[in-house]
Image (spheres, rainbow, N blue to C red):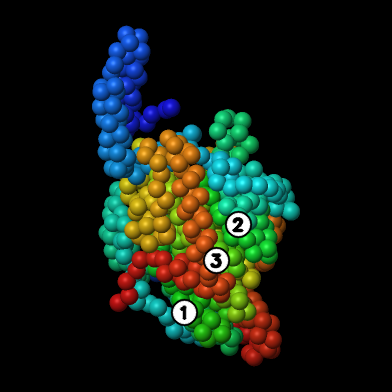
């Protein structure tokens, strides 16, 4: 397990614990009391550290390479997943995956950005940065879900929509814009969950839902802290400051009325206890589906559009 | 006239007697350097007669150019920006706003006007690039939303004139959500069958492109405007080489199928009149005499 700088106290305590256990084994000593004491210390250190994380620290956790990605959730939260491919136009975008699956006994459409874990996968998945065909594939699947009356679940985890020659040629802006418009009038429940990084239009392009949720240690904003720092401070050095200024954490986003809720992560982040994370997300999704299924499609659309229409901060004199 | 003296001899201008024009009343084209009087420049809708360069203009100029007899009513003029995140970079957002307001005399980077174009009613929301780069914050989102509501209530076409670098970082996720808000409102406008015209001018990039600017029933671009999602600098850094000539220009977008037409600003009013008359299925009442 890789530790972040701010996890140093935990790392040291865990090292001590290991040593005590080794000593006990080697010398056949009963050090249960010391072990217990250390374990309590570790737990307390984790609680202290994780209840006071800065924006930048959460950005780091959201990018941890051991964090569950979309396909991990697909495997552990859902059953009977059938992956579907292609936008029926240009190609299959591997940075955006999707297909039909079951959660409990409910059929749903699951769509999400997909990152890679090693160099080869990262290239194949384009670091989770979708091209226009990815957004168009997502919309195609959403329209299918609407046709067959299935709730839609999107999992957001992207450092941004792909910037490049081909992306521009094929209309990255138009592809995202179209999704925003079409998602706002989908006749089935739409639940969006930021599971890692929620960067800008690339995230929003699959982010218009009746419930927009963020896992506890994720971020969602108009720009990454690094890019914000380079534009406003003209240097990459101010990413910590930028992360604070952007108010990009789940807690801030909820406070500002820009998301509907925060889903707690296991202590130490989703990667510290993936099984627990899968169960929490599954319970949360099932509850939301049950709630939203009670509403007529007219009510769903009216409420969804009403919610986004209210977002903003201005005064009228 | 110090700068004007440096212009090479032999430059042609449509002005007959340069010497009779007082200092400061000349406009020199930033591209071809052709000089015309500011009055001529304005009469030509701020388009260079030499090279067709379209100078950046603001909402006031667009409204005066497009509406019949330059007559229009401004709507929602009393909406002011706030600083919801108490944002501070090298300068705090509050003073940035105050400075821009003082300099431009505007409340934010957008104004909404309604009137007629060749007798057809329309509501137009237009950006002002000189207010923090035409960046999209909550005020812009709210004004576009209200312009769309106004179009729905009064059954009149809606037009948005974009000229923006994209999102306003100092409003962070509030700014991002204006993309969702305006697109959702456009879905309602579409359901009512009311036309939406998007005019893309130089520059139209970022979150503006990835929402309402690309959603027109008619996407119209001014010539040679920069239009794209990612900025050219970001793309150049990502791919590690120079961009092809004309990449992300209006002409490039027309070629790739993302705008319907490129219209010279000098023809814009008559082209819109024709379009509105076709959409209304009514004849053009007064043929344009300009
Ligand atoms: Zn010129």
Circle 1 SS class: strand
Q: Local crowd at mark 3 within 10 Å, few (<14), some, or many (≥20)?
A: some
Tell me the residue that label 2 is attached to.
A106
Chain of the residue that carries numbered disc 3 in the rendered image: A
Left or right: A147, with B196 as reference point: right
Residue B183 place in picture, x, y as percent: 53, 67
Circle 2 SS class: strand
Label at residue B113: 1
User: Is there any visible trace of residue A86 in the rendered image?
Assistant: yes
Please check whether the numbered discs 1 and 2 fall on a single chain: no
Q: Residue at x 41, y 44 (%)?
A: A265
Tell me the residue that label 3 is attached to.
A293
The image quarter in which residue A175 lies: bottom right
In space, the residues marked 3 and 1 are separated at their CA atoms by 42 Å
Residue at the extreme top: A27
Depth check: give the residue in front, B250 or A208.
Answer: A208
Q: Is residue A112 above or below residue B190?
A: above
Depth check: give the residue in front, B194 or B234.
Answer: B194
Q: Local crowd at mark 1 within 10 Å, few (<14), some, or many (≥20)?
A: many
């Amino acid at each position: 397990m890789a530790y972040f700088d701010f996890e140093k106290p935990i790392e040291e305590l865990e090292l001590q614990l290991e040593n005590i256990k080794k000593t006990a084994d080697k010398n056949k000593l009963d050090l249960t009391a010391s072990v217990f004491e250390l374990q309590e210390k570790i737990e307390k250190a984790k609680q202290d550290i994780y209840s006071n994380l800065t924006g930048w620290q959460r950005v780091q956790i959201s990018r941890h390479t051991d964090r569950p990605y979309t396909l991990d959730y697909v495997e552990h939260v859902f059953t009977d997943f059938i992956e579907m491919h292609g936008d029926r136009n240009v190609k299959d975008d591997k940075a955006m995956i999707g297909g039909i699956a079951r959660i409990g006994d409910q059929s749903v459409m699951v769509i999400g950005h997909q990152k890679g874990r090693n160099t080869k996968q990262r290239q194949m998945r384009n670091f989770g940065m979708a091209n226009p065909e990815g957004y168009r594939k997502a919309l195609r699947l959403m329209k299918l879900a609407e046709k067959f009356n299935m709730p839609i679940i999107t999992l957001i985890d992207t450092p941004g929509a792909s910037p490049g020659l081909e992306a521009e040629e094929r209309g990255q802006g138009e592809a995202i814009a179209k999704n925003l418009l079409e998602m706002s009038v989908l006749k089935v429940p739409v639940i969006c969950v930021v599971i890692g990084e929620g960067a800008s239009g690339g995230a929003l392009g699959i982010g218009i839902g009746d419930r927009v949720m963020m896992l506890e240690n994720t971020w969602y904003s108009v720009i990454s802290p690094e890019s914000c720092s380079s534009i406003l401070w003209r240097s990459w050095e101010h990413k910590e400051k930028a992360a604070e200024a952007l108010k990009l954490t789940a807690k801030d986003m909820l406070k500002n009325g820009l998301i509907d809720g925060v889903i707690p992560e296991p202590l130490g982040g989703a990667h510290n206890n993936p099984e627990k994370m899968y169960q929490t997300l599954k319970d949360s999704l099932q509850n939301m589906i049950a709630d939203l299924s009670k509403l007529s499609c007219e009510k769903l659309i009216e409420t969804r559009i009403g919610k986004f229409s209210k977002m903003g901060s201005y005064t009228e004199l | 006239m110090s700068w004007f003296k440096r212009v090479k001899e032999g430059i042609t201008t449509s002005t007959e007697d340069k010497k009779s024009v007082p200092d400061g009343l000349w406009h020199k084209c930033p591209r071809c350097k052709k000089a015309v009087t500011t009055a001529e420049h304005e009469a030509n809708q701020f388009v260079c007669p030499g090279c067709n360069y379209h100078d950046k203009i603001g909402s006031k100029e667009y409204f005066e150019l497009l509406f019949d007899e330059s007559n229009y009513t401004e709507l929602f003029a009393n909406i002011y920006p706030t600083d919801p995140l108490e944002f501070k970079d090298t300068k705090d957002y509050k003073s940035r706003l105050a400075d821009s307001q003082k300099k431009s005399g505007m409340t934010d980077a957008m104004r909404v006007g309604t009137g007629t174009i060749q007798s057809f009613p329309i509501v137009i929301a237009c950006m002002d690039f000189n207010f923090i780069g035409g960046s999209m914050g909550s005020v812009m989102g709210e004004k576009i939303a209200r312009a769309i509501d106004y179009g729905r209530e009064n059954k009149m076409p809606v037009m948005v004139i974009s000229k923006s670098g994209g999102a306003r970082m100092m409003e962070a996720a509030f700014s991002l959500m204006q993309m969702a808000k305006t697109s959702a409102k456009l879905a309602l406008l579409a359901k009512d069958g009311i036309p939406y015209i998007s005019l893309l001018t130089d520059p139209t990039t970022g979150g503006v492109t990835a929402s309402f600017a690309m959603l027109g029933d008619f996407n119209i671009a001014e010539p040679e405007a920069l239009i794209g999602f990612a900025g050219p600098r970001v793309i150049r850094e990502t791919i590690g080489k120079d961009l092809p000539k004309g990449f992300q220009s209006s002409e490039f977008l027309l070629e790739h199928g993302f705008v319907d037409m490129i219209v010279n600003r000098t023809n814009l009013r008559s082209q819109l009149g024709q379009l509105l008359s076709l959409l209304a299925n009514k004849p053009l009442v007064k043929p344009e005499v300009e």
